[in-house]
């Protein structure tokens, strides 16, 4: 199994600023993903974090707004740039190895933008 | 934190058969969701169902919040239904807790 930690667990930010969320896995994993859950909505995939290359973004999400880094097999960051109140959400990272068919999840980061 | 248990852990079905997946959770929750993990590991949301019953095609889900469980029904299963199904709950402090999943294999 894998244990995933996220930092920060929650934050309150001002409009126009940026926040970087960290995701740390206690073992090497192949796949890492970032999700967003806006209030009253379901979890939505933002992007797949690729180790050593640019992330793969889903429709509706762009790199300028959500830059992602994955410098190695155990760590990834998601930045929410130039925030607006509409970015207030829970951001969740997940990780796993496709071969095991098991996905592990971080506890989430609750972001409030004023 | 909340304990989320899913059963069965593994399930093999003949194409066309029906199945019920169960999710038990140990405390009150704000929300509950069912996901299907695709072969690339991505989670595809199936239902957002903190209570009540919802249906979407061959799939339906029921959550009985007072008894702390949820059920996912798959009818007339197809090979494309294969994969891992996750139940996830969100507690009153907005923390997520995921079950360990049910691995479903549908054979032709």
Image: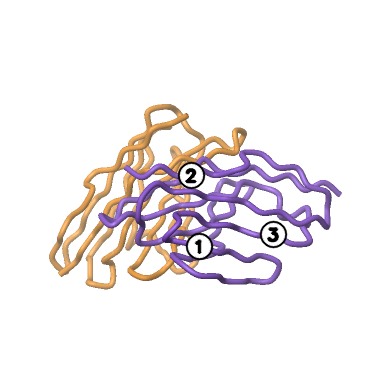
Q: Are marks 1 and 3 on the same chain?
A: yes
Residue carrying label 2 = B99
Q: Earlier in the sequence, mark 2 or mark 3?
A: 3
Q: Quarter of the image containing the C terminus of chain A?
A: bottom left
Residue carrying label 3 = B74
In the rendered view, tell whether residue B80 sits above or below residue A15.
above
Observer-nearest of A19 and A67: A19
Q: Residues within 10 Å of mark 3 (few under 14, many from 20)?
A: some
Q: Earlier in the sequence, mark 1 or mark 2?
A: 1
Q: Residue furthest front?
A: B67
Q: Which chain is purple?
A: B
Can see residue A53?
A: no
The quadrant holding residue A62 is: bottom left
Is there a contact, CB below 8 Å, between mark 1 and mark 2? no
Disc 1 from disc 2: Cα separation: 15 Å
Q: Nearer the viewer, mark 1 or mark 2?
A: 1
Rendering coords of residue B51 (x, y %): 46, 67
Disc 2 from disc 3: Cα separation: 18 Å
Residue carrying label 1 = B63
């Amino acid at each position: 199994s894998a244990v995933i930690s996220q930092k920060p667990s929650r934050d309150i930010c001002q409009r126009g600023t940026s926040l970087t969320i960290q995701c740390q896995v206690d073992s090497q994993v192949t796949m890492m993903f970032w999700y967003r859950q806006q209030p009253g909505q379901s979890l939505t995939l933002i992007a797949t974090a690729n180790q050593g290359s640019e992330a793969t973004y889903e429709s509706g999400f762009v790199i300028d707004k959500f830059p992602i880094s994955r410098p190695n097999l155990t760590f990834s960051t998601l930045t929410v740039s130039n925030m607006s109140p509409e970015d207030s959400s829970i951001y969740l990272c997940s990780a796993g190895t496709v071969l095991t068919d098991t996905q592990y999840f971080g506890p989430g980061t609750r972001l409030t933008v004023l | 934190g909340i304990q989320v248990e899913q059963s069965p852990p593994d399930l093999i079905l003949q194409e066309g058969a029906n199945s019920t997946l169960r999710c038990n959770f140990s405390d009150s929750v704000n929300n509950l969701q069912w996901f299907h993990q695709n072969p690339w590991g991505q989670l595809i949301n199936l239902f957002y169902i903190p209570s009540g019953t919802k249906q979407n095609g061959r799939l339906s889900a029921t959550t009985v919040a007072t008894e702390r469980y949820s059920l996912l029904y798959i009818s007339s299963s197809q090979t494309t239904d294969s994969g891992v199904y996750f139940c996830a709950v969100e507690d009153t402090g907005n923390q997520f807790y995921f079950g360990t999943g049910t691995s479903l294999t549908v054979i032709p």
